[in-house]
């Protein structure tokens, strides 16, 4: 893989680390809503979990904690996840890492993709657990196979770096492209780089590369905007050089 993509991979790792900080503190800054939106089963079938979310958003942490715990004990995987996050973050209760990890694992085992992603990130970063990139890879794969975009990006990074799995640029591209199609800005940039350079099973296609750069640029990536401009000029020059 070309040096530019490898350089981008380093940038990706920094951005993903920032995502993890948000994930581990998932109940902060409205991020709970993302997990709530993803778990349609709990959203539609568990009024108590909905009430707990409302109490949390209103700042009634004690009530939210109790409601999440009660719903979690009845098997609501979203409640399991949110209860775990409150325990890990010490919201409405003293921090309780072991109990938090237990409930997070329950939500992950219940096939909640966001819980699987966060559980994998804990192992990838060594947050609350011993660092174990192989275990992280296993959970990222579970979440990514359900279409979880952040997990797809994390999985792509692992394949590109050879972390927790054999290095495989072809697999890295597959998962970067999935994450790009899911709207992730970083993945859009990296996917554009694959198409710009070609190789590793990817046919060079500057038009497709430009489209991915454009998508990332539209989300505010300045490097992608520059690449889009450069490829636009290159494609225009190529067109003008063709015999009429």
Image: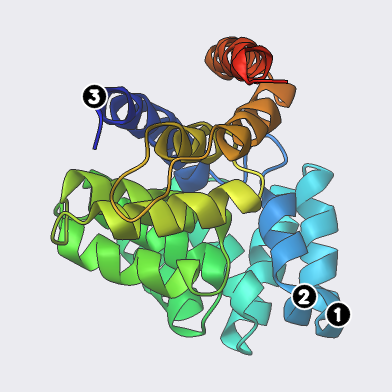
Percent across and percent down for residue 192 are 51, 35
Label ID, residue 40 = 2
Label ID, residue 3 = 3
- Foreground pick, 216 / 12: 216
- Tags 3 and 2 touching, CB below 8 Å: no
138 left or right of 132 in image: right
Q: Give the residue at x 38% y 70%.
A: 141
- Tags 1 and 2 touching, CB below 8 Å: yes
Residue topped by disc 1: 44
Q: CA distance from mark 3 to mark 1?
A: 47 Å
Which image quarter is the C terminus in?
top right
User: Helix or strand or loop: what does disc 1 sit on?
Assistant: helix
Q: Give the residue at x 68% y 80%.
A: 71
Q: Give the residue at x 83% y 68%.
A: 50
Which image quarter is the N terminus in?
top left
Percent across and percent down for residue 121 are 35, 52
Percent across and percent down for residue 112 are 56, 75
Q: CA distance from mark 1 to mark 2?
A: 6 Å
46 left or right of 204 in image: right
**Can residue 96 be seen in the rendering of this structure?**
no
**Can residue 39 be seen in the rendering of this structure?**
yes
223 left or right of 141 in image: right
35 left or right of 42 in image: left
User: Helix or strand or loop: what does disc 3 sit on?
Assistant: helix
């Amino acid at each position: 893989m070309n040096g530019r993509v490898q350089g981008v991979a380093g940038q990706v790792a920094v951005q993903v680390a920032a995502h993890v900080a948000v994930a581990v503190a998932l109940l902060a800054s409205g991020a709970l809503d993302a997990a709530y939106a993803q778990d349609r089963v709990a959203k539609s079938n568990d009024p108590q979990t909905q009430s707990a979310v409302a109490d949390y958003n209103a700042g009634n942490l004690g009530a939210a904690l109790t409601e999440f715990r009660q719903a979690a004990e009845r098997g609501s995987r979203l409640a399991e996840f949110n209860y775990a996050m409150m325990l890990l973050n010490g919201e409405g209760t003293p921090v309780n890492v072991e109990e938090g990890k237990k409930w997070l694992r329950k939500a992950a085992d219940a096939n909640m993709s966001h819980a699987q992603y966060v559980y994998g990130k804990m192992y990838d970063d060594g947050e609350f657990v011993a660092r174990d990139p192989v275990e992280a890879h296993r959970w990222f794969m579970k979440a990514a196979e359900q279409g979880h975009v952040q997990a797809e990006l994390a999985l792509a990074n692992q394949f590109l770096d050879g972390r927790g799995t054999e290095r495989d640029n072809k697999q890295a591209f597959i998962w970067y492209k999935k994450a790009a199609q899911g709207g992730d800005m970083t993945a859009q940039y990296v996917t554009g780089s694959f198409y710009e350079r070609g190789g590793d099973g990817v046919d060079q296609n500057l038009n497709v590369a430009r489209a991915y750069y454009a998508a990332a640029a539209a989300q505010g990536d300045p490097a992608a905007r520059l690449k889009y401009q450069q490829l636009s000029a290159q494609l225009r020059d190529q067109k003008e050089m063709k015999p009429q």
